[in-house]
Image (tube, grey):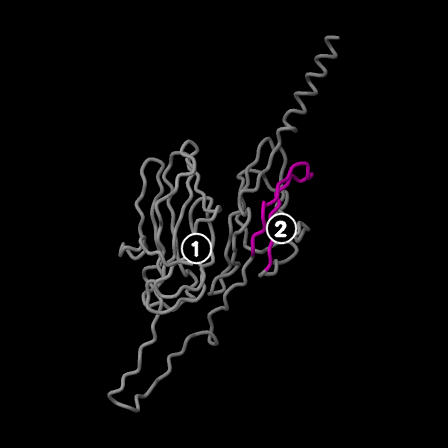
Amino acid sequence: MRKTILLIAAVFILLAPLAAQNIHVLKPNGGEMLMPKDAQGNPRTFLIQWAAKNINQKVKIVLLNADGSKFGLIKGNRDVFPAEYLWPIGQTESGPAPAGKYYKIRVATMDNSCEDVSDAPFVIQVPPPPLGPGNVFKKKLSVNVNPGITTPVPLKPDLIVCKILPQILDKSLYLQKLQFRVHNIGKGPSPACSVWIDCPQVLGPQSVKPLAPGEFEEFTNENAKIYWAGADIPYTFHVDKDGLVAESDENNNVLTGVLSASTSESAKCSDGKSHSIFKVTKKW
Protein backbone atom coordinates (compact mmCIF):
# COMPACT_ATOMS: atom_id res chain seq x y z
CA MET A 1 0.00 0.00 0.00
CA ARG A 2 2.83 2.36 0.92
CA LYS A 3 4.58 1.68 -2.40
CA THR A 4 1.36 2.46 -4.26
CA ILE A 5 1.00 5.81 -2.48
CA LEU A 6 4.61 6.69 -3.20
CA LEU A 7 4.16 5.76 -6.87
CA ILE A 8 1.05 7.94 -7.18
CA ALA A 9 2.84 10.83 -5.47
CA ALA A 10 5.78 10.47 -7.86
CA VAL A 11 3.43 10.57 -10.86
CA PHE A 12 1.81 13.77 -9.61
CA ILE A 13 5.23 15.34 -9.04
CA LEU A 14 6.26 14.50 -12.60
CA LEU A 15 3.03 15.76 -14.14
CA ALA A 16 2.78 18.99 -12.14
CA PRO A 17 5.37 20.95 -14.18
CA LEU A 18 3.69 19.82 -17.40
CA ALA A 19 0.30 21.06 -16.24
CA ALA A 20 1.80 24.43 -15.27
CA GLN A 21 3.50 25.05 -18.63
CA ASN A 22 2.50 28.32 -20.23
CA ILE A 23 3.45 30.57 -23.15
CA HIS A 24 1.84 33.95 -23.73
CA VAL A 25 2.53 36.18 -26.78
CA LEU A 26 2.97 39.80 -25.66
CA LYS A 27 4.03 41.52 -28.90
CA PRO A 28 2.72 41.76 -31.51
CA ASN A 29 -0.69 41.06 -30.05
CA GLY A 30 -3.07 42.82 -32.43
CA GLY A 31 -3.43 46.21 -34.11
CA GLU A 32 0.25 46.93 -34.70
CA MET A 33 1.25 48.43 -38.05
CA LEU A 34 4.73 47.26 -38.99
CA MET A 35 6.67 48.74 -41.88
CA PRO A 36 9.47 46.49 -43.23
CA LYS A 37 11.53 49.34 -44.75
CA ASP A 38 11.90 53.08 -44.35
CA ALA A 39 11.91 55.70 -47.09
CA GLN A 40 15.64 55.12 -47.65
CA GLY A 41 15.05 51.41 -48.23
CA ASN A 42 16.69 50.35 -44.97
CA PRO A 43 15.18 47.22 -43.35
CA ARG A 44 13.39 47.66 -40.05
CA THR A 45 13.05 45.27 -37.13
CA PHE A 46 10.39 44.54 -34.51
CA LEU A 47 10.95 42.99 -31.09
CA ILE A 48 8.69 39.93 -30.74
CA GLN A 49 8.13 39.25 -27.04
CA TRP A 50 6.44 36.51 -25.04
CA ALA A 51 6.13 35.26 -21.46
CA ALA A 52 6.91 31.63 -20.56
CA LYS A 53 6.53 29.47 -17.48
CA ASN A 54 7.95 25.99 -16.79
CA ILE A 55 9.09 25.51 -20.40
CA ASN A 56 12.05 23.13 -20.41
CA GLN A 57 12.57 22.79 -24.15
CA LYS A 58 13.32 25.06 -27.09
CA VAL A 59 10.65 27.02 -28.94
CA LYS A 60 9.82 28.19 -32.44
CA ILE A 61 8.34 31.43 -33.76
CA VAL A 62 5.92 31.10 -36.66
CA LEU A 63 4.23 33.70 -38.86
CA LEU A 64 0.56 32.90 -39.46
CA ASN A 65 -1.88 34.34 -41.94
CA ALA A 66 -4.82 36.22 -40.40
CA ASP A 67 -7.01 33.10 -40.71
CA GLY A 68 -4.54 31.10 -38.59
CA SER A 69 -2.93 29.14 -41.42
CA LYS A 70 0.86 28.95 -41.45
CA PHE A 71 2.79 31.34 -43.68
CA GLY A 72 6.33 30.48 -42.68
CA LEU A 73 8.82 29.80 -39.90
CA ILE A 74 10.49 32.91 -38.49
CA LYS A 75 12.88 31.14 -36.12
CA GLY A 76 13.02 27.59 -34.84
CA ASN A 77 14.90 25.58 -32.22
CA ARG A 78 15.85 28.59 -30.10
CA ASP A 79 16.03 28.99 -26.33
CA VAL A 80 12.83 30.13 -24.67
CA PHE A 81 14.80 32.78 -22.72
CA PRO A 82 15.46 35.58 -23.27
CA ALA A 83 11.75 35.66 -24.22
CA GLU A 84 12.17 37.95 -27.18
CA TYR A 85 13.39 37.90 -30.78
CA LEU A 86 14.45 40.86 -32.94
CA TRP A 87 12.55 40.15 -36.14
CA PRO A 88 13.49 41.67 -39.51
CA ILE A 89 9.89 42.61 -40.27
CA GLY A 90 8.22 40.23 -42.71
CA GLN A 91 11.16 37.83 -43.10
CA THR A 92 10.63 34.06 -42.76
CA GLU A 93 12.55 30.96 -43.85
CA SER A 94 9.93 30.62 -46.60
CA GLY A 95 10.63 34.10 -47.92
CA PRO A 96 9.30 37.59 -47.14
CA ALA A 97 5.63 38.04 -46.26
CA PRO A 98 3.71 40.27 -48.70
CA ALA A 99 3.02 43.77 -47.39
CA GLY A 100 -0.50 45.11 -47.13
CA LYS A 101 -1.84 41.99 -45.42
CA TYR A 102 -2.71 40.94 -41.88
CA TYR A 103 -0.82 38.31 -39.89
CA LYS A 104 -0.44 36.76 -36.43
CA ILE A 105 2.55 35.42 -34.48
CA ARG A 106 2.63 31.94 -32.94
CA VAL A 107 5.19 30.97 -30.28
CA ALA A 108 5.25 27.23 -29.48
CA THR A 109 7.46 24.53 -28.02
CA MET A 110 9.21 22.41 -30.63
CA ASP A 111 6.84 19.48 -29.93
CA ASN A 112 3.77 21.81 -30.04
CA SER A 113 2.74 20.76 -26.53
CA CYS A 114 2.44 24.40 -25.45
CA GLU A 115 1.78 27.46 -27.60
CA ASP A 116 0.10 30.85 -27.87
CA VAL A 117 -1.01 33.06 -30.77
CA SER A 118 -1.51 36.82 -31.08
CA ASP A 119 -4.97 37.77 -29.86
CA ALA A 120 -5.72 39.77 -33.02
CA PRO A 121 -4.01 40.34 -36.39
CA PHE A 122 -1.40 42.99 -37.08
CA VAL A 123 -0.61 44.45 -40.50
CA ILE A 124 2.64 44.63 -42.44
CA GLN A 125 2.39 47.98 -44.17
CA VAL A 126 3.42 48.76 -47.72
CA PRO A 127 6.75 50.63 -47.41
CA PRO A 128 7.03 54.16 -48.82
CA PRO A 129 8.64 54.50 -52.25
CA PRO A 130 12.44 54.66 -51.92
CA LEU A 131 14.07 58.01 -52.38
CA GLY A 132 15.77 58.25 -55.74
CA PRO A 133 16.08 60.34 -58.88
CA GLY A 134 12.43 59.72 -59.76
CA ASN A 135 11.14 60.67 -56.31
CA VAL A 136 13.35 63.60 -55.39
CA PHE A 137 11.52 66.92 -55.38
CA LYS A 138 12.93 69.19 -58.07
CA LYS A 139 12.64 72.91 -57.57
CA LYS A 140 11.57 74.65 -60.78
CA LEU A 141 12.99 78.00 -61.73
CA SER A 142 10.13 80.44 -62.17
CA VAL A 143 10.32 83.82 -63.85
CA ASN A 144 8.05 86.58 -62.69
CA VAL A 145 6.75 88.05 -65.94
CA ASN A 146 4.68 90.60 -64.03
CA PRO A 147 6.95 92.59 -61.74
CA GLY A 148 5.08 93.91 -58.74
CA ILE A 149 2.80 90.85 -58.57
CA THR A 150 4.04 88.41 -55.97
CA THR A 151 3.46 84.68 -56.28
CA PRO A 152 1.76 83.29 -53.15
CA VAL A 153 3.94 80.97 -51.07
CA PRO A 154 2.39 77.47 -50.69
CA LEU A 155 1.03 76.93 -47.20
CA LYS A 156 2.75 74.06 -45.42
CA PRO A 157 1.69 71.88 -42.48
CA ASP A 158 3.67 71.60 -39.26
CA LEU A 159 3.26 68.43 -37.20
CA ILE A 160 4.02 68.14 -33.51
CA VAL A 161 3.32 65.38 -31.00
CA CYS A 162 2.00 66.01 -27.48
CA LYS A 163 1.84 63.70 -24.47
CA ILE A 164 -1.28 64.02 -22.34
CA LEU A 165 -1.25 63.46 -18.60
CA PRO A 166 -0.97 59.69 -18.01
CA GLN A 167 -4.08 57.80 -17.00
CA ILE A 168 -3.53 55.46 -14.06
CA LEU A 169 -5.38 52.22 -14.74
CA ASP A 170 -4.23 50.24 -11.70
CA LYS A 171 -1.95 51.87 -9.12
CA SER A 172 -1.15 48.62 -7.33
CA LEU A 173 0.04 47.03 -10.59
CA TYR A 174 1.79 50.21 -11.80
CA LEU A 175 -0.39 50.09 -14.93
CA GLN A 176 -0.70 53.23 -17.06
CA LYS A 177 -2.21 54.09 -20.38
CA LEU A 178 -0.01 56.47 -22.37
CA GLN A 179 -2.18 58.98 -24.22
CA PHE A 180 -0.85 61.33 -26.86
CA ARG A 181 -1.94 63.56 -29.74
CA VAL A 182 -0.51 64.54 -33.11
CA HIS A 183 -1.34 68.18 -34.00
CA ASN A 184 -1.03 70.11 -37.23
CA ILE A 185 -0.09 73.61 -36.05
CA GLY A 186 0.90 74.73 -39.56
CA LYS A 187 -1.07 76.71 -42.12
CA GLY A 188 -1.45 73.97 -44.72
CA PRO A 189 -3.10 70.51 -44.69
CA SER A 190 -1.01 67.49 -43.80
CA PRO A 191 -1.30 64.14 -45.65
CA ALA A 192 -1.47 60.81 -43.84
CA CYS A 193 1.77 59.74 -42.16
CA SER A 194 2.81 57.85 -39.03
CA VAL A 195 4.16 58.50 -35.55
CA TRP A 196 6.86 56.18 -34.22
CA ILE A 197 6.67 55.17 -30.57
CA ASP A 198 9.66 53.93 -28.61
CA CYS A 199 8.56 52.84 -25.15
CA PRO A 200 8.39 49.42 -23.40
CA GLN A 201 5.27 47.47 -24.48
CA VAL A 202 4.52 50.19 -27.07
CA LEU A 203 6.88 50.03 -30.02
CA GLY A 204 6.53 50.81 -33.71
CA PRO A 205 4.49 53.06 -36.00
CA GLN A 206 0.96 54.32 -35.49
CA SER A 207 -0.91 55.63 -38.55
CA VAL A 208 -1.94 59.29 -38.47
CA LYS A 209 -4.87 60.54 -40.57
CA PRO A 210 -4.65 63.58 -42.85
CA LEU A 211 -4.96 66.69 -40.68
CA ALA A 212 -6.27 70.10 -41.70
CA PRO A 213 -4.63 73.17 -40.13
CA GLY A 214 -5.46 73.30 -36.42
CA GLU A 215 -6.72 69.72 -36.24
CA PHE A 216 -5.29 66.87 -34.21
CA GLU A 217 -5.72 63.13 -33.76
CA GLU A 218 -5.71 61.63 -30.29
CA PHE A 219 -4.45 58.12 -29.51
CA THR A 220 -5.88 56.29 -26.52
CA ASN A 221 -6.00 52.74 -27.86
CA GLU A 222 -5.66 49.75 -25.58
CA ASN A 223 -2.24 48.88 -27.05
CA ALA A 224 -0.78 51.94 -25.32
CA LYS A 225 -0.42 50.43 -21.86
CA ILE A 226 2.77 50.93 -19.88
CA TYR A 227 3.88 48.52 -17.18
CA TRP A 228 6.70 49.19 -14.76
CA ALA A 229 8.08 47.79 -11.52
CA GLY A 230 9.25 50.90 -9.72
CA ALA A 231 11.80 51.96 -12.35
CA ASP A 232 11.61 55.05 -14.53
CA ILE A 233 10.73 54.37 -18.16
CA PRO A 234 12.04 56.58 -21.00
CA TYR A 235 9.88 57.21 -24.06
CA THR A 236 10.30 58.83 -27.48
CA PHE A 237 7.66 59.92 -29.99
CA HIS A 238 8.75 60.80 -33.55
CA VAL A 239 6.03 62.02 -35.87
CA ASP A 240 6.69 61.65 -39.62
CA LYS A 241 9.95 59.78 -39.02
CA ASP A 242 9.95 58.72 -42.69
CA GLY A 243 9.99 62.34 -43.87
CA LEU A 244 6.90 61.96 -46.06
CA VAL A 245 5.40 65.34 -45.11
CA ALA A 246 6.97 68.60 -46.32
CA GLU A 247 6.64 70.76 -43.21
CA SER A 248 7.32 74.38 -42.49
CA ASP A 249 9.42 73.26 -39.50
CA GLU A 250 11.11 69.84 -39.58
CA ASN A 251 12.86 70.29 -36.22
CA ASN A 252 9.94 69.91 -33.79
CA ASN A 253 8.81 66.34 -34.52
CA VAL A 254 10.48 64.49 -31.62
CA LEU A 255 9.23 64.34 -28.03
CA THR A 256 11.19 62.58 -25.28
CA GLY A 257 10.61 62.14 -21.58
CA VAL A 258 10.46 59.74 -18.67
CA LEU A 259 7.50 58.01 -17.02
CA SER A 260 7.93 57.50 -13.30
CA ALA A 261 6.09 55.37 -10.79
CA SER A 262 6.58 58.02 -8.09
CA THR A 263 6.05 61.33 -9.88
CA SER A 264 3.67 62.45 -12.61
CA GLU A 265 5.23 64.14 -15.63
CA SER A 266 3.28 67.14 -16.90
CA ALA A 267 1.70 67.29 -20.33
CA LYS A 268 4.05 68.63 -22.99
CA CYS A 269 4.56 69.03 -26.75
CA SER A 270 7.52 68.43 -29.04
CA ASP A 271 7.78 72.11 -30.00
CA GLY A 272 8.37 73.06 -26.36
CA LYS A 273 5.28 75.31 -26.23
CA SER A 274 1.91 75.00 -24.55
CA HIS A 275 -0.09 77.54 -26.64
CA SER A 276 -3.30 76.25 -24.96
CA ILE A 277 -3.07 73.14 -27.09
CA PHE A 278 -4.88 71.00 -24.56
CA LYS A 279 -7.92 73.27 -24.72
CA VAL A 280 -8.49 72.59 -28.42
CA THR A 281 -11.80 70.86 -29.05
CA LYS A 282 -11.49 70.36 -32.80
CA LYS A 283 -10.36 66.80 -33.54
CA TRP A 284 -11.11 63.71 -35.57
Q: Secondary structure at mark 1?
A: strand
**Pointer 1 local density, CA inside 10 Å: few below 14, some 14–19, many at least 20:** some
Percent x, y of residue 225: 45, 43
* Image height of 10 relative to 50, above or below: above
Q: Which residue sits at x=69%, y=18%?
A: 10
- Relative to 224, is 267 on the left or the right? left
Is residue 113 shown in magenta?
yes
Q: Does 269 appear above or below 79?
A: below
- Please tell me which of labels 2 and 1 falls first in the chain: 2
Residue at the extreme bottom? 145
Question: What label does residue 63 carry, if any?
Answer: 2
Q: What percent of the width, then of the height, locates residue 15?
A: 67, 25
- The residue indicated by pointer 1 is 196
Quadrant in which the N terminus appears? top right
**Position of 32 relative to 225 (above/below):** below
Residue 132: say if magenta.
no
**Residue name at image x 70 percent, y 20 percent:** 11
Front one among 268 and 217? 217
- Looking at the rendered structure, the kind of residue marked 1 is Trp
Residue at screen point 34% across, 50% down: 256
Q: Nearer the viewer, mark 2 or mark 1?
A: 1
- Nearest the viewer among 178 and 62 is 178
Where does the image place residue 262, in percent across and percent down from the top left?
Answer: 33, 35
User: Could you tell me residue 90's position as x and y percent?
Assistant: 58, 56
Query: Main SS type for the magenta part?
Result: strand
The span shown in magenta is 101-123
Residue at the outermost front position: 281
Q: Residue at x 47, y 53 (%)?
A: 204
Q: Quadrant of residue 186?
A: bottom left
